[in-house]
């Protein structure tokens, strides 16, 4: 039986007014979370429950993540606020963010999974609120080096952006410059509204992580581009069928496609890979109980249970430095937290995020004309 200090018992007595709530607070104390943080979390649970928040609307990236939210995060939050109904919306940022921006005067989504570029665009558009570290008890396990630039948001999953290829059609690429080989004319798939491939083209040609330099580097080789895509699934199908042979792509999505029987493989070339992060963002425009409960909900995305399931089922890389990658999950597209810190390329997402329409127009003029 564990003996708590007087200070710890005071927190339990003050906020553990139900068996479930007391159990949650005790588990935090046993895990080594400080009394102040546990007390603050107790306030969150009490305030959320007393206010009887009726619903939360959470934006999820597509794929396995909506299921993890429904299976792990929603039940956890309903222990705090049993009456709350959580609506998890499954949509990519290119589609959902403009809608969120249009609804900013009367917002619907209180918490969201946001990619690197829209995380920065949302800062410029004043869409995000700052997290409370005392509610986000798992924040202490996220290395500072991979935190969201700009002071808004918290990354909760990573994946390297490297090269997907059809192993029956080509040898494993070793360089980003392999995409320029003349024998790959019409056999490379590219995006015109996502820019990490151009970042790496800039790196591989000695210009650094510069999108414009990368677009220019592609200009002499534009006939290699056989398909323009806007969907990871479409791109995976194209490579699987051999309609294209190579495609800059996310490790998690490529390995997931491979696990589903598609004839694709993934590699990180010698010049490296861009760190793609999925960031949690707290949206402005909600009252305090909703804001608090939303943060408690998203805090579960950093829990070891959520992180490990994301590794096993979605081939994502963790950000919680206490989480170990299961041996059976060590594939090319999964990196450890330390590997991410040491090796992945993190371009100036703020600068890139402010220029998205410009880059799209430049691609249209330079590579698609």
Image (cartoon, rainbow, N blue to C red):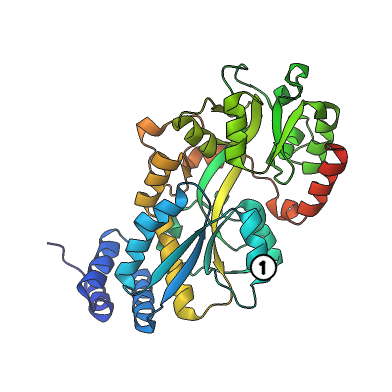
Quadrant of image for the C terminus: top right
Residue 229 appears at what percent x and percent y?
68, 39
Is residue 240 something one can see in this rendering?
yes
Seen at 48% across and 42% down, the residue is 316
Q: Count residues near mark 1 (Cα–Cα under 10 Å), then give few for <14, some for 14-19, many for 20+.
A: some
Classify residue 341 by image quadrant: top right
- Farthest residue to the bottom: give it: 50
Classify residue 366 by image quadrant: top right
For residue 184, side relative to residue 269 (left or right):
right
In the rendered view, tell whether residue 30 sits above or below residue 256: below
For residue 188, side relative to residue 344 (left or right):
right
Seen at 52% across and 65% down, the residue is 111
Foreground residue among 203 and 104: 104
Foreground residue among 246 and 124: 246
For residue 15, side relative to residue 174 (left or right):
left
Task: State the SS at label 1.
Answer: helix
Residue assigned mark 1: 101
- Farthest residue to the left: give it: 1
Is residue 273 something one can see in this rendering?
no
The number of numbered discs placed on residues in the rendered structure image is: 1
């Amino acid at each position: 039986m564990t003996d708590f200090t007087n200070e710890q018992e005071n927190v339990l007595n003050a906020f553990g007014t139900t068996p479930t709530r007391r159990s949650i607070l005790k588990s935090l104390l046993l895990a080594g979370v400080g009394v102040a943080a546990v007390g603050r979390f107790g306030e969150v649970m009490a305030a959320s429950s007393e206010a009887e928040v009726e619903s939360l609307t959470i934006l999820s990236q597509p794929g396995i993540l909506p299921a993890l939210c429904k299976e792990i995060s929603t039940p956890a939050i309903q222990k705090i606020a049993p009456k709350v109904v959580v609506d998890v919306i499954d949509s990519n940022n290119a589609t959902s963010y403009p809608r969120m921006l249009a609804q900013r005067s009367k917002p619907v989504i209180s918490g969201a999974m946001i990619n690197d570029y829209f995380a920065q665009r949302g800062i410029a558009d004043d869409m995000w609120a700052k997290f409370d570290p005392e509610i986000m008890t798992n924040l202490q396990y996220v290395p500072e080096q991979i935190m969201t630039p700009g002071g808004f948001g918290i990354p909760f999953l990573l994946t390297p952006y490297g090269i997907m290829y059809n192993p029956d059609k080509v040898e494993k690429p070793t360089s980003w410059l392999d995409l320029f080989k003349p024998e790959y004319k019409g056999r490379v798939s590219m995006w015109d509204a996502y820019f990490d491939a151009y970042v790496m083209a800039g790196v591989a040609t000695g210009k650094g992580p510069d999108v414009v330099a990368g677009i220019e580097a592609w200009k002499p080789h534009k006939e290699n581009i056989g398909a323009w895509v806007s969907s990871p699934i479409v791109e995976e199908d194209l490579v699987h069928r051999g309609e294209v042979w190579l495609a800059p792509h996310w490790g998690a999505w490529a390995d997931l496609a491979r696990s589903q029987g598609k004839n694709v493989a993934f590699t990180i070339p010698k010049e490296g890979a861009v760190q793609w992060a999925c960031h949690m963002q707290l949206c402005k425009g909600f009252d305090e109980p909703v804001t608090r409960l939303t943060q408690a909900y998203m805090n579960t995305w950093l829990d070891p249970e959520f992180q490990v399931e994301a590794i096993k089922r979605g081939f994502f890389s963790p950000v919680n430095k206490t989480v170990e990658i299961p041996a059976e999950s060590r594939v090319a597209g999964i990196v450890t937290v330390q590997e991410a810190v040491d090796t992945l390329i993190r371009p100036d997402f703020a600068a890139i995020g402010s220029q998205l329409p410009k880059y799209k127009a430049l691609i249209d003029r330079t590579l698609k004309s």
